[in-house]
Amino acid sequence: MAQSDLRQERTSLLLRQALIALVADMPYDAITITDITRRARVARKTFYAHFADKDALLIACIEPLLITLAESISNTDPETLLADNKPLSYPVFKHVQEHAVFYRAMLNEHGSARFILYLLDFMTHNSYERHEAIRQIAPRITVEPMLIAHFLAGALLNSIIWWLKQDCQPSADTMAYTFSQLAAPGTLAALGLE
């Protein structure tokens, strides 16, 4: 890797770390580019050389974590819809619990609408992909599969928001099974797998 590439990656990392630290200290909507550049100790023009705006930086902070999370759910059993003998939502709840300070800050009235839309889109597409195997064995699909994915992502995100307000209680394991209990019957019926 060239020296300039290393410098750019280091600067990008400093900016991401600065935003994550600031999110833990103050409402996201109150954070300014100046706050970020001061914390990262870089010039404002350097920020704009890397990111279009604060939300673009925010997405750059969370995207690698979400990709890793999605990859961890890749071994889904199509007959049980379990991954490693747990509901598909278990790794999601576990991830949110591990990053609760961040998600609490972002999924409230001071968070970012763009982040929430990005998260919903990511969850929707991941849900659609994870349910491909079950669609292959579905005898009669009565609801558009992408609508099912949108429904599940929205329900999961709202469950996460509720759970964060409960200080991540009950456990991630319990939340995953509860979410499945709520979501599975309708989803299976829409796929003709009652």
Image: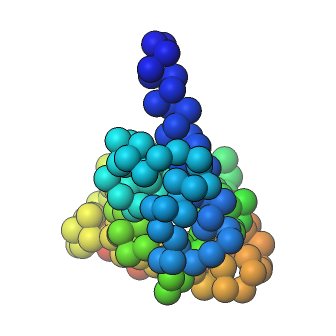
Residue 1 in sight? yes
Q: Position of residue 135 (x, y in %)?
A: 33, 55
Residue in the image at 51% along x and 23% along y = 6
Q: Is residue 62 above or below residue 102?
A: above
Q: Position of residue 30 (x, y in %)?
A: 51, 77
Q: Could you tell whether 153 is left or right of 167 in the image?
A: left
Say how the picture is coloured: rainbow
Residue in the image at 47% along x and 77% along y = 29
Q: Could you tell whether 20 is left or right of 173 in the image?
A: left
Q: Position of residue 127 (x, y in %)?
A: 41, 58
The quadrant of the rendering that contains the C terminus is: bottom left
Q: Is residue 153 above or below residue 169?
A: above
Along the viewing direction, whichever of 170 and 60 lies nearer the viewer: 60
Q: Position of residue 77 (x, y in %)?
A: 53, 48
Residue in the image at 68% along x and 52% along y = 85
Q: Quadrant of residue 46?
A: top left
Q: Could you tell whether 91 is left or right of 116 in the image?
A: right
Residue in the image at 27% along x and 64% along y = 145
Residue 63 in sight? no
Along the viewing direction, whichever of 10 and 119 lies nearer the viewer: 10
Instruction: Return the residue found at the far top.
Output: 2
Query: How many numbered markers are drawn?
Result: 0
